[in-house]
Image (cartoon, grey):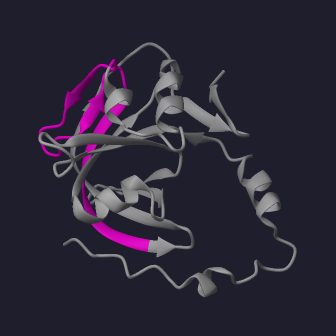
Amino acid sequence: MLQKSPASPPVSDLAIPHAEGVSNDDFRAAMSRLAAGVVLVTAHDPDDGPRGEDVGMTATAFVSVSLDPPLVLVSLRNGSRMDDLLTDVPVWAVSILGENQRHIAGRFAMKNRVSDRLLFADLPYARGEESGAPLMGGALATLECRTESRVVAGDHTLVVGRVLTVGAVAPAGGPLTYYQGKYRQLS
């Protein structure tokens, strides 16, 4: 069952000071020491234009939550296009990127882009049967998900998705990772 997020807290509630001694810079520096896998989260917005539009975003805050049932979690910045879209569209997809797909991660991590249509234009992808969302060709694995719940957590929304389909490929190379503010390869 899809659970809606509560309304965003008033701005005054977001201004609560951090715990003593923890600044944004300190927290960011500490968390940059945690290596993370890189994924592309995609969804199809059927209401954007006559044929709809595909939307994508790079994410590093993506984890497996449960095996039974199969659940994953992705963290979305509050008010981002993907956060807004997944409030209304219950199905979405994830492509786990390989080390040779750094260009895809960089492309969909750009801020203030005008349209995602151009970002998908020259990329090989298949459309998911369950979600209708793009699944990147050459990805290490792909998942199609249906939102189970949404939880507002600070300036992000945690979206838990039930995995509907899994596709895996075996390209050469390892996963794309993100560490200390840069995309990296395992060595």
| Position of residue 115 measured from the top left corner of the image (x, y, whole percent) | 37, 38
Q: Residue at x 65, y 42 (%)?
A: 35
The correct choice, above or below, for 99 with respect to 29 in the image is above
Relative to 74, does residue 9 appear above or below in the rendering?
Answer: below
Q: Is residue 172 left or right of residue 144?
A: right
Q: In the displayed structure, does residue 88 sit left or right of residue 118?
A: left
5 on left or right of 181:
left
User: Residue 77: horizontal and vertical position, in percent?
Assistant: 50, 59
Residue 158 placement (x, y as % from top left): 44, 65
Q: Residue at 45%, 57% (x, y): give it.
A: 80
Q: Is residue 128 magenta?
A: yes
Position above or below: 94 against 182? below
Residue 49 versus residue 181: which sits nearer the camera?
Answer: 49
First to last magenta residue range: 122-151
* Magenta highlight on residue 56: no
Q: Residue 57 falls in which quadrant of the image?
A: top left
